[in-house]
Amino acid sequence: MATISALILTYNEESNIGACIGSCRNVVDKIIVMDNNSNDRTKEIAESLGALVDQSDLTYKKRFAKGISHPYVDTDWIIYMDADERLTPESSKELKKMCDRYLDSDITGIVCRYVNCFLGKEIRHGDSVGRKLRVFKKGCAAFETKELDEHVILLRGREAYMKTDILHLDFRGLEHWINKHNGYAKRTAKEHLDGLEKELPMDGLAKVSRIRRNIKNKIYYKLPMGMRAHLLYIYRYYFRLGFLDGNEGKILIFLHAYWYRFLVDSYICEYQKEAQAKDKKNNGETG
């Protein structure tokens, strides 16, 4: 029988950590919380539920790296979670079966299905179900060095795919969503511009992540600026049946296309103009 550890990364998650641990405690053998020196009751709640809590001021990626190599984590498999994620009874059972089945095979990672909850509703259409490599054998995975939208990559072996869902409950109101995605848009625009002349790394990415990254960089960003956000909305809402999620689905897809993705394009345009103005100024000074 395979053994499993849950690695949970936290910062001020007293409202989430109890439910997160409760959702996975029946399927995992050990729980370690890598906490970013929370100043609420995250540590106390986690410890009361049997978790080992390691507190530090390390960055997210460094806490992940420390967690997967922590002496306490001596199990066959590790599932990496954020505090606002929940295993369901169905996904818990499937996870355990897959870890047992692939214990002595070349399968070293498991890609999980993620269903996002938005305005209190699970969004299941419109290409909204995410897939992330979140379960891996100890010593077989790491975070890629990409600054934004980074993935866990496999250092060796190959991946299998879960069919049941993990719930992602990160929605904290529209104002929080908009402010968060404004920050994401700035970073995404800069990352895109910085990466125009170099190939994005693909080694170790799960197949589904490689496909999505290729589509984004080789198809989406080749479309005219401004038009691509509109086409993304049409694709997700009509062709991928986003309308089946009702008003909540329409709001999410609309905001993702016409707020977030269009805002990314706007920042790209702004940064390009700033760079052009800087070049003109420098050429004028040296000419």
Image (cartoon, grey):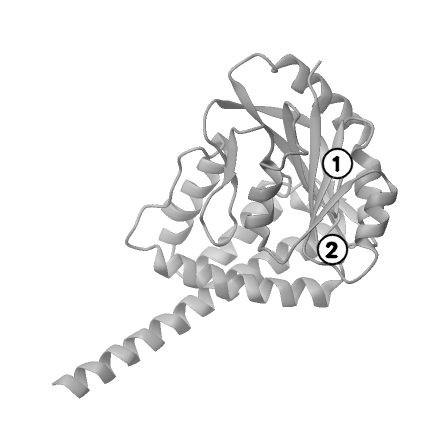
Q: Mark 1 belongs to which amino acid?
A: Ile
Residue 3, above or below 132: above
Residue 204 placed where, x, y %? 44, 33
Badge number at residue 171: 2
Residue at the image point whose x is 56% and y is 57% from the top: 257
Side (left or right) of 152 relative to 189: right
Say which quadrant the C terminus sits in: bottom left
Q: Is residue 131 visible?
A: no
Say which residue appears at 36% left-offset and 52% top-offset.
222
* Number of the label disc, if any, that sits on residue 17: none
Please, what is the three-letter code of the amino acid marked with disc 2?
Answer: Phe
Quick check: marks 2 and 1 in contact, CB under 8 Å? no
- First along the sequence among labels 2 and 1: 1
Is residue 180 positioned above or below 23 on the image?
A: below
Q: Residue furthest left?
A: 287
> Which residue lies under the disc numbered 1?
31
Please indicate whether residue 142 sits to the left or right of residue 276 in the image: right
194 sits left or right of 89 in the view? left
Q: In percent of the image, x 39 and y 53: which residue is there?
A: 221
Q: Is any atom of residue 209 visible in this view?
A: yes
